[in-house]
Image (spheres, rainbow, N blue to C red):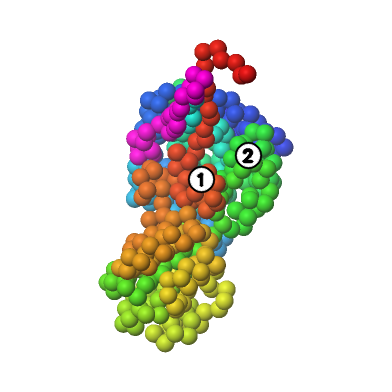
C-alpha cells in the first residue's frame, strides 16, 4: 500500500515510501500514454462521483481550521465546494488531453563520423511535494506527475488531512483500476512535522522537492533540502499603472487582480501609480478598492486621493498580505517603477497597465520576474490559464523551471547516441 497508517512508527516511514515510489517510477517510464490518460480520465470521473464524500471530509477540515483561528485566506484555500470540485475534475481531464511530455526528441544531429545524437525528454523520477492548506494540490500534483511519468510522495498539511486523504484514496482507485502501481502516488498521512525533515534528507530517494505554502515552509525547504528545489518564497505581485493607462481598464483589472481571490499567490499586493497618471483615474482605482472593503496603505500622495487611505510603512512595499489589503505608492516614470519592483518584489508576477508601447517594452524586458503581464490581471498567473491543465507550483528560480510548473517542466532530458561501430581515435 502507498499510504502507511499514521499509527505506524515514523522512524522508517519516508524510507519505506521512497523505496516504493522509486520502484513505481521505474515502471512508469515505460507505461503507455493511453494507459496514463485512461487513469486520469477515470480519476476525473471518480472525483465527480465522490462529491458528497469530499464535501463531508472538507467540512471537517474547515471546522477544525476555523476553531484553530486560521486566517480567512488560509480557510479560503482549504475550502471545497461544488464549483471547485468540478474545477479539480476538469483540470485532470485537461492534463490527460495534453501531449505526452516524455520521449520527445528535443534536438538531433548527425556528426561527421556518422554518430547520430538525440536529446530526448525523460521523467525526472521521484518528486517530493510538501504543501499547506489546498486539498486540490493533492490532485494537481498526482495528475501532473502521472502525466509526466513521474512518481510522487505527497505530504499535505494537517489542516487538510481529511480532504487530501479522501482525494488520495480516489487516486489509488484509479491507479489500481488501470493496473498501475499504487505507490506511484504516495501520501504521508502522519502529521508529525519531523517527517518533513526526513523528506528533505532523502536525496537518495527523492530527486526534486517542491514546496507549496507559506514563506516559512518554503524557506525551510530551500535551506534544508539535500536535493534540488522548485520553489518560490512570496507572491508580492505588482500592478504598475502607467500614465497612458485607460481608466476603465485600470479600474477593472486592478479590482480583479487584488480581489478575485485574495489568498492566492497571484493576487496583486502592491500598486504603483505613475506620477503622470491623471488624478481622476487614480481616484477611481482607489475608491473602487476601498468601496469593496479593501484596506489601502499609501504614501502621502496616495493618502490625498481618499481620506480612507491609511499611511504606509516601509515594510508595506514588500508585504504579501493574502488578504483584502494592498499598498500603493506614486513612482516617477517606468524606470523607477522597474527598480522599485525588482527591489521589493518577489520575482513572481508583475504587470503594467499602459498604452505606451515604449513603456511596455521597457517594462517587459527589464522586470526580473517569472511572469510579466501587460494590460491584464496578475490572477492569470496559473498553469491552467497557460494551457498546462494545472500547475504544481510557480517557480521563481532561474534554472530549469520558471513560472507555472506543468508537465513539461517535470521532465529532464538525456542524450541517446547511435553508432555503427565507431571508435574514438
Residue at 55% x, 25% y: name it: 26
Foreground: 258 or 343?
Answer: 343
Seen at 37% across and 48% down, the residue is 386
Give the CA distance from mark 2 to mark 1.
33 Å
Q: Residue 177: name its quadrant.
A: top left
253 relative position to 24: left or right:
left
Q: Residue at x 32, y 69 (%)?
A: 356
Helix, strand or loop at mark 1:
loop
> Label 2, on which residue?
6
Give the residues drawn in magenta, as a range: 92-116
Q: In which quarter of the image is the N terminus?
A: top right
Q: Residue furthest top?
A: 421
Residue 166 versus residue 305: which sits nearer the camera? 305
Nearer the observer: mark 2 or 1; the answer is 1
For residue 296, say whether it is visible. no
Q: Position of residue 182 (x, y in %)?
A: 52, 28
Q: Is 402 placed above or below 425 here?
A: below
Provide residue 261's location: percent of width, then percent of height. 40, 61
Image height of 376 relative to 279, above or below: above
Q: Can residue 368 be seen in this view?
A: yes
374 over 56 or under it: above or below: below
In the image, residue 107 lies at what x, y percent?
45, 31
Using the image as rendered, state which of residue 171 and residue 349 is in the foreground: 349
Looking at marks 2 and 1 on the same chain, the residue that comes earlier in the sequence is marked by 2
Most foreground residue, 348 or 187: 348
Q: In which quarter of the image is residue 268?
A: bottom left
Q: How crowded is mark 2: few (under 14 residues within 10 Å), some or many (20 or more)?
A: few
* Mark 1 neighbour density, 10 Å: few (under 14) some (14–19) many (20 or more): many
Identify residue for label 1. 401
- Residue at the spot x=41%, y=51% of the render? 382
Q: Do the residues labelled 2 and 1 touch (CB within 8 Å)?
A: no
Quadrant hosting residue 422: top right
Amino acid at each position: 500500500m502507498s499510504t502507511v497508517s499514521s499509527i505506524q512508527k515514523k522512524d522508517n516511514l519516508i524510507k519505506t515510501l521512497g523505496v516504493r515510489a522509486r520502484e513505481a517510477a521505474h515502471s512508469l517510464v515505460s507505461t503507455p500514454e493511453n494507459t496514463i490518460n485512461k487513469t486520469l480520465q477515470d480519476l476525473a470521473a471518480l472525483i465527480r462521483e465522490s462529491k458528497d464524500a469530499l464535501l463531508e471530509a472538507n467540512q471537517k477540515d474547515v471546522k477544525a481550521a476555523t476553531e484553530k483561528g486560521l486566517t480567512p485566506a488560509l480557510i479560503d484555500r482549504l475550502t471545497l465546494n461544488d464549483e471547485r470540485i468540478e474545477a479539480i475534475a476538469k483540470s485532470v481531464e485537461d492534463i490527460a488531453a495534453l501531449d505526452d511530455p516524455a520521449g520527445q526528441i528535443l534536438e538531433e544531429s548527425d556528426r561527421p563520423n556518422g554518430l547520430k545524437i538525440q536529446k530526448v525528454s525523460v521523467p525526472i523520477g521521484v518528486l517530493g511535494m510538501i504543501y499547506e492548506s489546498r486539498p486540490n494540490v493533492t490532485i494537481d500534483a498526482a495528475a501532473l506527475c502521472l502525466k509526466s511519468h513521474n512518481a510522487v510522495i505527497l505530504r499535505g498539511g494537517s489542516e487538510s488531512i481529511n480532504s487530501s486523504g479522501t482525494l488520495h484514496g480516489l487516486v489509488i482507485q484509479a491507479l489500481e483500476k488501470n493496473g498501475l502501481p499504487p505507490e506511484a502516488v504516495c501520501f504521508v498521512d502522519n502529521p508529525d512535522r519531523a517527517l518533513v525533515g526526513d523528506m528533505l534528507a532523502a536525496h537518495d530517494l527523492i530527486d526534486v522537492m517542491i514546496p507549496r505554502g507559506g514563506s516559512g515552509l518554503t524557506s525551510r525547504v530551500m535551506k534544508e533540502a539535500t536535493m534540488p528545489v522548485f520553489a518560490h518564497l512570496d507572491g508580492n505581485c505588482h500592478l504598475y499603472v502607467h500614465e497612458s493607462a485607460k481608466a476603465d481598464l485600470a479600474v477593472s483589472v486592478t479590482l480583479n487582480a487584488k480581489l478575485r481571490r485574495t489568498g492566492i499567490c497571484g493576487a496583486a499586493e502592491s500598486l504603483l501609480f505613475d506620477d503622470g497618471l491623471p488624478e481622476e483615474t487614480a481616484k477611481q482605482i482607489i475608491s473602487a478598492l476601498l468601496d469593496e472593503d479593501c484596506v489601502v496603505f499609501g504614501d502621502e500622495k496616495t493618502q490625498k486621493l481618499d481620506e480612507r487611505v491609511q499611511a504606509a510603512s516601509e515594510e508595506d512595499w514588500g508585504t504579501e498580505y493574502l488578504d483584502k489589503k494592498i499598498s500603493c505608492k506614486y513612482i516617477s516614470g517606468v524606470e523607477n517603477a522597474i527598480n522599485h519592483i525588482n527591489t521589493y518584489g518577489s520575482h513572481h508576477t508583475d504587470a503594467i497597465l499602459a498604452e505606451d508601447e515604449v513603456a511596455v517594452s521597457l517594462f517587459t524586458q527589464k522586470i526580473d520576474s517569472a511572469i510579466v503581464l501587460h494590460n491584464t490581471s496578475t490572477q492569470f498567473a496559473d498553469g491552467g490559464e497557460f494551457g498546462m491543465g494545472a500547475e504544481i507550483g510557480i517557480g521563481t528560480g532561474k534554472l530549469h523551471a520558471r513560472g507555472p510548473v506543468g508537465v513539461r517542466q517535470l521532465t529532464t532530458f538525456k542524450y541517446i547516441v547511435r553508432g555503427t561501430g565507431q571508435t574514438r581515435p
